[in-house]
Image: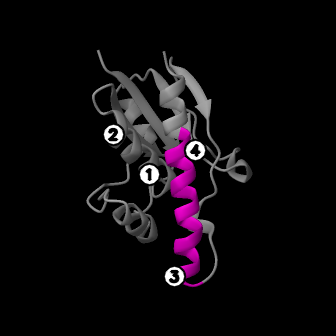
Amino acid sequence: MEKKVLFICVHNSARSQMAEAFLKNLASDKFEVESAGLDPGKLNPIVVEVMKEIGIDISENKTKSVFDFYKAGRKYDYIITVCDESQSGKCPVFPGGGVRMHWGFDDPSGFVGDWNEKLIKTRIVRDKIRNKIEDWLRELP
């Protein structure tokens, strides 16, 4: 039976989308994966670009509301928040069971600079998320 994983962030426009895509890419045979946000925004175009660079297309993804998942009665084995530490007070909580984890990553929507500078910073976040998921998969029984 597949384990269910929910990645949560504030807007579901960057970090949680990348985490969902990586876990699906690396272990879709073991996990059913979703992501959502407290206040769903628009998919971050820089995130779409940096994921496309490594062969993962998330351009058709939609941002989703964690409240809608709760209202639908969804249950998860793992609930993983990916907000950065400065947003920890805003990071959504999903009620119910499941193992809760927090993996803090910088928010690409807050990066300043021109397009290229934001790309560079977002690539760093992308790689940190991929590394964290790869480490987590190795640690699982």
Q: What distance separates the C-alpha of mark 4 from that of mark 3?
A: 23 Å
32, above or below 12, in the image = above
Q: What distance separates the C-alpha of mark 3 from that of mark 1?
A: 19 Å
**Along the polypeptide, which appears first: circle 4 or circle 3?**
4
Q: What distance separates the C-alpha of mark 3 from that of mark 2?
A: 28 Å
User: In the rendered structure, are the residues bearing label 2 and label 1 in contact, judged by CB atoms less than 8 Å apart?
Assistant: no
Q: Secondary structure at mark 1?
A: helix
**Along the polypeptide, which appears first: circle 3 or circle 2?**
2
Q: Is residue 85 left or right of residue 100?
A: right
Q: Is residue 115 magenta?
A: yes
Mark closer to the observer (4, 1): 1
Residue 77, percent from left and from top: 44, 20
Instruction: Give the extent of the magenta segment.
Output: 114-132
Q: What numbered label is drawn on residue 24?
A: 2
Q: Secondary structure at mark 3?
A: helix
**Along the polypeptide, which appears first: circle 2 or circle 1?**
1
Quarter that holds the N terminus: top left
Based on the displayed image, in which of its 4 quarters is residue 72 positioned? top left
Q: What numbered label is drawn on residue 115?
A: 3
Can see residue 9?
no
- Amino acid type shown at disc 2: Lys
Disc 1 designates what residue? 18
